[in-house]
Image (cartoon, rainbow, N blue to C red):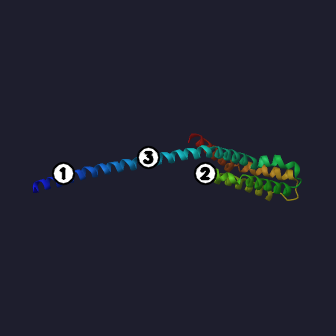
Amino acid sequence: MEQMIVELVIYGLLWLIVISGLAYTASKLIRSHWASRKQSQLLQHQLEVKKHLVPYQLQAAERLVLLVERIRPEGLVNRMAAGESTAAGLQLAMLAQIRMEMEHNLAQQVYVQARVWQAVIAARDEVLGIIHRAAAQTPPNEAAIQFSRNLFQVLQQQPLTACDQAIQSLRNEIQQLQHD
């Protein structure tokens, strides 16, 4: 009888070990399945978000390229010189136009990487610096055409590298969006 009890205990322990192993394996498989499913859902969600976000990011990059092109001094002078008669008037009009362009496109920064937005800010700052240097060389009551000449002289001495870098950063951003 004792031997039968010992055998029952041994068989019971063996069954307990087998059942524990099966339960452990089953729980690992279930956890793995749910983790895989959760990962799949996360990837699906990311693809869905990206599908809706990419058009906005592309549009923002395009608008920021246009912004950088519109604040270049050559374009500003061509668009504004006819309406201003004095150097101070042209300078103020150019500064106001740059401020307006920046304010109009301020929200685009949320759709581009921070380094790209910083490149746009650097371009704006470079243009403002060039305008201020040209203004420092031109008496305020001088004709606007003289301010324009001085502006182009400053541009010849210091090319717009930050504007070119900003546009290149925006191009890179667009290419990255197209390849992701």
Residue found 38% across the figure and 48% down from its top: 30
Query: Which residue bears the numbered disc 2?
Result: 113
In the rendered image, which quarter contains the N terminus? bottom left
The disc placed on residue 90 is none
Q: How many labels does the image show?
A: 3
Q: Which of 8 and 86 is in front in this view?
A: 8
In the rendered image, which quarter contains the C terminus? top right
Query: Could you give the CA–CA distance between mark 2 and mark 1, rounded to whole angstroms?
Result: 65 Å
Q: Give the secondary structure at mark 3.
A: helix
Query: Could you give the CA–CA distance between mark 3 and mark 1, rounded to whole angstroms?
Result: 37 Å
Q: Residues within 10 Å of mark 3 (few under 14, many from 20)?
A: few
Q: Give the secondary structure at mark 1.
A: helix
Query: Could you give the CA–CA distance between mark 2 and mark 3, rounded to whole angstroms?
Result: 30 Å
Q: Give the secondary structure at mark 2.
A: loop
Q: Which of marks 2 and 1 is in front?
A: 1
Q: Nearer the viewer, mark 2 or mark 3?
A: 3
Q: Residues within 10 Å of mark 1 (few under 14, many from 20)?
A: few
Drawn side of residue 69 relative to residue 27, left or right: right
Q: Position of residue 34 (x, y in %)?
A: 43, 48
Q: Which of 34 and 179 is in front in this view?
A: 34
Query: Which residue bears the numbered disc 3?
Result: 36
Q: Where is residue 63 in the image (x, y as percent from the top left)?
A: 70, 46
Q: How crowded is mark 2: few (under 14 residues within 10 Å), some or many (20 or more)?
A: few
Residue found 78% across the figure and 56% down from its top: 95
| Residue type, numbered disc 2 | Gln
Label 3–label 1 contact, CB within 8 A = no
Looking at the image, tell me whether mark 2 or mark 1 is earlier in sequence order. Answer: 1
